[in-house]
Image: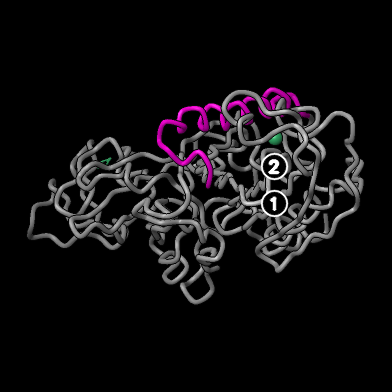
Amino acid sequence: MIVNTWYIAGFADELVAGTPKAVRMLGHDFVLFRDSAGKVHCLSDVCIHRGGSLCRGKQVDNSVMCPYHGWRFDGAGACVDIPSIGKDIPIPKRARIDSYPVAEQWGWIWVFLGDLPEAERPALPGMDFMPEWDANGAGAYRFTRGTFLFDVNWMRAIDNVLDPAHPFHVHSEFGHVEDQRIKGYPVEDDGVKTLSRHSFKSTPKQGNWRQVMNDDRPPTKNSLQFHMSGLILRNDIHPNPGMHHFVFSAYLPIDQNKTLNIWMHGRNFFTEPKYDADTIKRTLVVFEEDTRVLQYVKPAQSPRRLTHELFLEADAHIAAFRRQVRAFEEKGWMLDPRAASFNDEVRVIPSPSRRADPKNWVLDPAITKPARIAAAE
Ligand code: FES
Ligand SMILES: [Fe+2]
């Protein structure tokens, strides 16, 4: 799992002011809370006094109170109250926890998990990555949304969505059994985003969608875009000229073996709300079909070397994604999975304030694979 990028921690409207919320990311626990001005904060969930879980405490004013002895931490991670020492004694400098940069965009909470100072942090994807978004729901597109938990490693889950050859076998309503060829295709790669385009003859649709997608329609046009900020896939499908729908999925590695897909689906047909339930069902069927195959893939984590699998032209987008991950690894930004489960010791993903002032932290930083070792492997 990689650090120094943005992750989607959940839907913004599910975090209400006054109620802290737990979120697990990259095998670490965090607490999110929204202050009285509406600003969201993300802190390491582990209290540095005796390990209390902050998300199980209360929000008091604009701080979270640990349920164990009542220490309170503000949005910057500074301890602002230690009841057992009273008000007259200064709070020790080490009484602080890691706090992470947070943003809100497209109805999502974004958390930057890493220690880069602001000037070096990658930008969020621009609005051109989601031009259909309208926060008031007044645009031409009707949105549905949800989450789906894959019992699958995050790279395996992302490999799968960048793979234009699998739908013929895995999905009941995509791809056509009589022509499964995937010709070589270019992958555009600007360092943070990759894009590939495909077209395929599709299987007959079932149910409502059959009314607007008949069997002799032209080949379906499809594009796949993946952004490393947020680990977001945008899968655009044009089943007929003028018809468009897309799945917008953020992949959140809960830990090495579990990945939460936080998704939105937009469509410019059947835009009445009465079609929402059917659209959600169709989306979930696709994820379920994927997971039935992915949960048994070996090794459970994508091999580090492309030569340890047989790559063909159809796999070009997966190869581009693997190269992007490798670039993180060679910067020393890959958590060491062996270190993560070594014992019951708690380590914390280092935050920007830790880099700015590295001494006087109670908990040690998470172990990443050194850049020189990653480069040599
Ligand atoms: S463990 Fe959190 S206040 Fe003591
Ligand atoms: Fe799939």
Q: Give the magenta range.
A: 268-297
Q: How many marks?
A: 2
Residue 247: where, in percent of width, then height? 58, 44
Question: Quadrant location of residue 201?
Answer: top right
Residue 162: where, in percent of width, then height? 73, 46
Mark 2 close to ligand 2, CB under 8 Å: yes
Q: Which residue is mark 1?
A: 224
Q: Nearer the viewer, residue 375 or 128?
A: 128
Q: Which residue is mark 2?
A: 161
| Residue 274 visible | yes
Q: Report if residue 270 lies within the magenta region.
A: yes
Q: What residue is shown at x 80% (from left), y 31% (from top)?
A: 168
Residue 302, relative to residue 299: is it above or below?
below
Q: Secondary structure at mark 1?
A: strand
Residue contact at pointers 2 and 1, CB within 8 angstroms: yes
Q: Residues within 10 Å of mark 2 (few under 14, many from 20)?
A: many
Ligand 1 lies in which image quarter? top left
Residue 305, relative to residue 261: is it above or below?
below
Q: What residue is shown at x 55% (from left), y 66% (from top)?
A: 128
Q: Residues within 10 Å of mark 1 (few under 14, many from 20)?
A: many
